[in-house]
Image (cartoon, grey):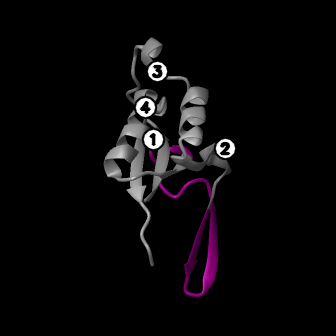
Amino acid sequence: MKYMMFVCTDTEPETDESSIPDIHTWVAENDAAGRRVTGSVLVSPSSATTVRVRGGEVLLSDGPFAETKEVIVGFDILECADLDEALAVAAAHPMAYSGRLEIRPFTDL
């Protein structure tokens, strides 16, 4: 089953940085195991453009739609046997210590 993992910042990161896993090791291990389909880091939210259509008119706004302290800084698409495996993969990600990770399953349309 495929899962989207949003990688987000957090206002309350882990204070003991010695316990944070290495991102390169996490990527290599999950790529080798076939659990990580793809992933990337995103550029700053200030470079975002929000697109809406209202009354037939395309409306563009600079920056993210929501004003929050936490922002999405990257993503990974995971291929896992079930939610428990996806959660274990997320718990081993470095941003689980200094940010937060949101896991969502894909749905078949």
Q: Quadrant of the N terminus?
A: bottom left
Answer whether labels 2 and 1 touch (C-beta < 8 Å): no
Q: CA distance from mark 2 to mark 1?
A: 14 Å
Q: Amino acid at mark 3?
A: Ile
Considering only order in the chain, which callout, 1 or 3, is on the residue closer to the N terminus?
A: 3
- Residue 64 sits above or below residue 40 on the image: below
Residue 77 position, x and y percent, is 53, 52
Identify the mark at residue 20; answer none if there is no mark: 3
Residue 54: image quadrant is: bottom right
Q: CA distance from mark 2 to mark 3?
A: 22 Å
Between marks 4 and 3 in the image, the one whose residue lies nearer the viewer = 4
Task: Identify which residue is drawn at 55% across, 33% down.
Answer: 29
Between marks 2 and 3 in the image, the one whose residue lies nearer the viewer = 3
Q: Quadrant of the C terminus?
A: bottom left
- The span shown in magenta is 50-74
Q: CA distance from mark 3 to mark 1?
A: 19 Å
Q: Mark 2: few, some, or many residues within 10 Å (few <14, many ≥20)?
A: few
Q: CA distance from mark 1 to mark 4?
A: 20 Å
- Mark 2: secondary structure: loop
Q: Is residue 29 left or right of residue 13?
A: right
Residue position marked by numbered label 2 in the rendering: 43
Considering only order in the chain, which callout, 3 or 2, is on the residue closer to the N terminus?
A: 3
Q: Mark 1: few, some, or many residues within 10 Å (few <14, many ≥20)?
A: few
Q: Is residue 57 left or right of residue 65?
A: right
Q: Amino acid at mark 1?
A: Glu
Considering only order in the chain, which callout, 3 or 4, is on the residue closer to the N terminus?
A: 3
Q: Amino acid at mark 2?
A: Val
